[in-house]
Amino acid sequence: MDAQRTPLVVANWKMHKTIPEALRFLDAFLPALEGLGAQGAPGVGRVVEVAIAPPFTALQAVGARLRSATASIGLAAQNVHPEPQGAYTGEVSPVMLSDLGCRYVIVGHSERRRHFGEDDAFINKKLLAALRHGLGPILCVGETLEERRAGRTQGVLERQLRGALAGCPPEGAERLVIAYEPVWAIGTGVAASPDDAQEGARFVRELLRELYGEAVAGRVRVQYGGSVQPGNAYELMVRPDVDGALVGGASLDPEQFAQIVAEAAKAVQAKG
Ligand code: PEP
């Protein structure tokens, strides 16, 4: 693994947790993280970066709590509108997210592509806007089961990446995180095999190399996402091109999410 890549493990809570529920999660998660370190899980919170993406309504409360925590945990938003302000009822701008102290924002999640009709061009606008306003985009790409069965996985990933990255300069690209999330693995309990996760991440990096050259491709973190659990996290994240995970369901539980972070730290050690 490239020594410069610190894996990133992100909790995507989707449309879950009120403010009190979010704070209860942190009450359990922060000590659990410290406890794992005390039990010898190597470098939890140091060799692995952690971020939490609560729903918009809990961003401020979670952000305030994270700022007062000892561990440095990033705040992430689940969505953003490309415009800085304007007549877009119900939307949240990148300026507002920066103002709240967000470090990251998820763009291109398959649930937004599927349920809200977001296409590559719109995702591209969001990604560029996020970068302009100091946010790190976590760009999700991945194929459906139908596309995989038709042998179109690489074609889909290439289309999604080229579409989302149009006009993105190298200095923006190196601030990206890309989550390879096969759609058929999200929320199904059936994760990709470690080989398939590695192959997806490798292909993403190869395309980054073609677009931006070796140095940028070597710096961008490529996560795996799709039914990551404490029991499969290590085998997925130990693969050379997989730099952490985007975690949905299992991130709702503080103990499970802390365990996944610990597995990421073990994977770092194993990769040397
Ligand atoms: C996700 O929401 O990006 C995700 C990977 O969800 P889950 O872990 O539940 O499959």
Image: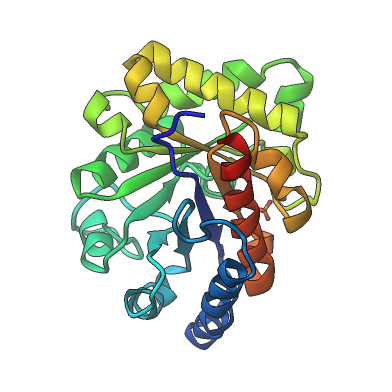
Image point (47%, 63%), residue name: 52
Q: Nearer the viewer, residue 61 or 93?
A: 61
Figure check: 167 above or below 23: above
Taking the image as shown, residue 193 lies to the left or right of residue 211, namely right
In which image quadrant can residue 74 be found? bottom left
- Colour style of the rendered protein structure: rainbow
In which image quadrant can residue 164 be found? top left
Taking the image as shown, residue 11 lies to the left or right of residue 97, namely right
Q: Residue furthest top?
A: 210
Q: Position of residue 240 (x, y in %)?
A: 59, 29
Q: Nearer the viewer, residue 246 or 69?
A: 69
In which image quadrant can residue 209 be found? top left
Q: Position of residue 223 (x, y in %)?
A: 54, 40
Q: Position of residue 217 (x, y in %)?
A: 40, 23
Q: Residue furthest bottom?
A: 20
Figure check: 144 above or below 154: below
Locate the C terminus by quadrant: top right
Image point (81%, 45%), residue name: 190
How many numbered marks, from 0 up? 0
Q: Position of residue 166 (x, y in %)?
A: 32, 23
Image point (66%, 36%), residue name: 182
Q: Nearer the viewer, residue 244 or 226?
A: 244
Image point (22%, 59%), residue name: 87
